[in-house]
Structure formats: structure tokens, C-alpha cells
Amino acid sequence: MVVVENLSKNFADPKKGVVRAVQDVSFVAKPGQTFGLLGANGAGKTTTLRMLSTVIQPTSGSATVNGFDVVRDSRSVRANIGFLSTSTALYQRLNPVEMLRYFGELYGMSKADTERRIEEIVAKLNIGEFMDRLCDKLSTGQKQRVSIARAILHDPPILFFDEPTAGLDVVTSQTILEFIEDCRNSGKTVIFSTHIMAETERLCDHVAVIHEGKMRAQGTVEGLKAEYQAESFEQAFLKIVDYRSEVNA
């Protein structure tokens, strides 16, 4: 479970002064569910996930990941999560198997457990056809599958996906979305950030809309559609962020 209470993050900008990237965000993501963190580019989604994954510390508020505080127990948090984004870097001079073995050592896994997990993941993500190719020779979609493998190698109970299909073709995107569904169905806690409404309707059990760093709405997809009298979730989302007033401002 992930519990977030009044989480905020400010950055200092030489020209703009204090930039409030995230302001008093609160939510709970539960096992066996996909929690959607929705918003336009720059809304604060990635900053929120970076705080939850201990990459940056919050300015105020608190959050626990599988019972561990993101500030006081950062090492334990990292041991309990897998994080995937479009910018996850790979070691270009290693092939996928070599890289996974390296991360197995970093995760403190035994050689036997590492090899067993690599065999499982290679089959699940269809990596076998390029497993001996250097990472810098892989396509964008192949690199993303290897990044998923790295994130789940240690079988963490909590997974963060930060716009994982951005820039990918339809076939690769489908593979990733099916994988996220499998994670939810296996009982993992999944937090999925996106601005693609079709993915939201397909994957998310519960959603929270962030706009300009603030939480604007929370609920189920159907519940928010009903609340905002919208036929599609895209229409509901535009009403939540007050799209027309911004266009006319």
C-alpha cells in the first residue's frame, strides 16, 4: 500500500522565485489495484512519483510505501518498489541478460534466484529474440521491455509506471499495458501516471487528477464521469481541469 498525506514539493527558480510543483497531494493506492495519476505535461505527476521513489525529498507532507517512510526509510522503500519511466537509462555496452545479472547483484539476490527470475521475465516480456544484443543496438520498444525487466527483477510489491508508453508504437504499447494488467491481477500495488485517457479507462481502478500541482479530483472513472456529467472520461478530465477557462484566459 502507498499512503500519501499532504505531500508538497517546492523548487527555487532564479527567475520565477519559488515554484510550487506539487501542493498538498493526498491519496491511498491499494494492493491489487491500479491507481491512475492523471494530468497534462507539467502537472506534477512525475515530481510526485520521484518523491515516492525517494529520488527527491518532499518539502512538506509525508508518504509511506509498503509501510516505510520515504524520507526516514528510503533504502527500504527502494527495496520494495520498481520504477519505470520513458527516460529509464540502460547500460549501453551490456546486453539485457548481463544488465539484469548486474542489477540482481545490486538488489542482493542470489545467483540462483537471479537466473530463475531472468528466465521468467525473458519469457514473459518476449526478450529472448534480442537478449544477446547490446542495449545501444535495441529499438525504443525493446529498450522499454528491458527497462521493465530491470524494474521487476526483484519482484517488488509496488510498481510505479511514469507514462511508460510515451513514444512507443501500438504493438509495444499493448505489450506494456497487458503487463501492467498482469501486475494488478497478481496483487501488486500499481501507480500509473499518464495523460492518455484511453489507457486510464482500460487500466485504472481509481484515479486522481493533478493540475498545476494540485489535486483536483479523485474517484473511479465511472464515478467521475457521472459527477461531471460527461459521456467519456476525456470530457470529464477537461471539465475537472477547467480547460475552456484556461483557453480563454
Image: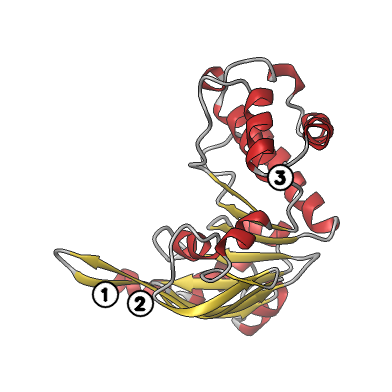
Q: Quadrant of residue 133?
A: top right
Query: Residue 245 has which mark?
Result: 2
On screen, residue 17 above or below 166: below
Residue 150 makes an appearance in the image: yes
Tell me the CA gap for discs 2 and 3: 42 Å
Relative image position of residue 44 (x, y in whole percent): 43, 66
Give amino acid for label 1. Ala
Residue 170 makes an appearance in the image: no
On screen, residue 215 above or below 95: below
Give amino acid for label 2. Ser
Neighbor class of circle 3 (other Cα within 10 Å; few <14, some 14-19, many 20+) is many
Quadrant (top left/top right/bottom left/bottom right) for the N terminus: bottom right
Q: Left of 37 or right of it: where is 55? A: left
* Element carrying mark 1: loop
Q: Nearer the viewer, residue 173 or 247?
A: 173
On screen, residue 120 above or below 197: above
Q: What residue would you read off at disc 3? A: 152
